[in-house]
Amino acid sequence: MSEFVNFNKRNISLPAGCKDLLDVLKHTGSAAKITTDDWSTEKLHDIAKWISAVLESKALLAKFALFSLDNRLSLHIFQINGETLDTSVGYTRSSENEQKMRAIFQHAGLQAPSDSAVIKGQRVQLSFRIRPEPVRAVELTKVASLIFQEFCGLEPSSGVRVHLSEVTNAT
């Protein structure tokens, strides 16, 4: 972890008067333009370039998503103005999947979230925030690879889908 990261500034709170990320862009007073919207199928061992791209992005809004080909698992990174607001993994909730993810988080030295509410009889996508949040691409790539390998049984040469989108000022 970098000693220069101010974790008091890192949160998922939106600025006053903003209810979603589009409001943040409107709040800046600038017109927004999607400049990147790339989808690709890659090998798990090649995700570092994508993670680096989002962490180094200077866009107003940058969003990265990594999916297993069977959609059982996803990883998301959200940034606004070059500051990472959230890094999380998502998967279909089941007690087996939750136990598996908690074990992976423990193995990776991450903080497992506290118990979450469940709606009885509903299929729920559960999201675990990655904490402490790796701040460098190499660290996050290792964590992401570990999670995908252990949760889905993927090999480094296995295929995954990636999506990177960036929004900049139109002016």
Image: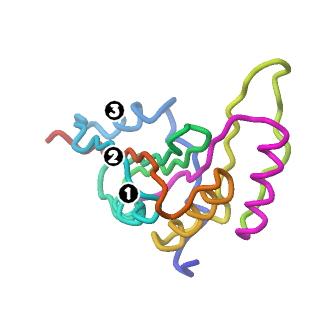
Q: CA distance from mark 3 to mark 2?
A: 29 Å
Which numbered marker is on residue 75?
none
Identify residue type, mark 2. Answer: Ser
Instruction: Determine which residue is flagged by label 2.
Output: 40
Q: Residue at x 56, y 37 (%)?
A: 71
**Relative horizontal placement of residue 16, taking residue 129 as reference (left or right):** left
43 in relation to 26, above or below? below
Magenta-highlighted residues: 82-109
Is residue 107 within the magenta segment? yes
Instruction: Determine which residue is flagged by label 1.
Output: 54
Q: Residue at x 45, y 65 (%)?
A: 45
- Location of the N terminus by quadrant is bottom right
Q: Position of residue 53 (x, y in %)?
A: 34, 60
Which of disc 1 and disc 3 is earlier in sequence? 3
Q: Name the image quarter holding residue 171.
A: top left
Name the secondary structure under disc 1.
helix
Instruction: Determine which residue is flagged by label 3.
Output: 26
Name the secondary structure under disc 2.
strand
Name the secondary structure under disc 3.
helix
Residue farthest left in this picture: 171
Is residue 87 within the magenta segment? yes
User: Closer to the camera, 158 or 170?
Assistant: 158
